Amino acid sequence: MTAAQLFDLNADKKTLFIFGGSQGSEALNKCTKGMINYLNDIQLLWQTGKSNIDKYEQFETDSVRVVPFIDDMKSAYALSDLSFSRAGALTIAELTSCGLPSILVPLPSAAADHQTHNGQSMVDAGAAELIPEAELDSKKTSEKIVSLMNDENALNKMTSKSKQLGKPNAVNVIVDQIMEKVIA
């Protein structure tokens, strides 16, 4: 089964993947709710979080898939052309491993503001754009998304930069280094 079939979306349409981590993000959800009417030619794969699904499932259409949680993140990333997400360490590791361009909204209450630092490293590398949560605006954010989705060159550059940051073999490298120390 393809990723498009799994999520019942069109493989030939541009896809925005919205997620705020496993719990979801009310800030991202509210912004997405306001963006739906501006993103006409873009389909959405929107993970709301289990506690938020009741508020947002009414927005599901043929081109908007609203789900509480995604077990198969690999398929979600494979289907997507751009992500709109938080900037936690695991999210960044997954995005870069897949080479997915991103618009990142750091969690403002994250310890030592680490999500802003994570996101800024992606921006500095050319793999993402960053929007502070306090500056989220549905119309402006949707304009940024549409602009990126319509600029294949920009998306390709961001994809390449994201892949360059990715460390898909990190676990193997760490295990090999541990084994070298244990055996030595």
Image: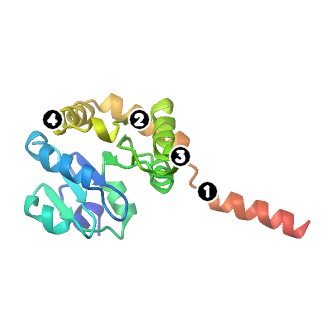
Q: Please tell me which of labels 1 and 2 falls first in the chain.
A: 2
Q: Is label 2 in a helix, a strand or a loop?
A: helix
- Judge the density around disc 1: few (<14), some (14-19), many (≥20) Cα neighbours within 10 Å: few
- At label 3, which amino acid type do we have? Ala
Front of the two marks 3 and 2: 3
Q: Is label 4 in a helix, a strand or a loop?
A: helix
Q: Which quarter of the rendered picture does the N terminus lie within?
A: bottom left
As drawn, the residue found furthest toward the right would be 184
Q: Is residue 61 visible?
A: no
In this image, 17 relative to 96: left or right? left
> Which residue corresponds to mark 4?
139
3D distance between C-alphas at marks 2 and 4: 22 Å
> Which residue corresponds to mark 3?
112
Front of the two marks 4 and 3: 3
Q: Please tell me which of labels 1 and 3 falls first in the chain.
A: 3
Q: Is label 3 in a helix, a strand or a loop?
A: helix
Front of the two marks 1 and 3: 3
3D distance between C-alphas at marks 4 and 1: 39 Å
- At label 2, which amino acid type do we have? Met
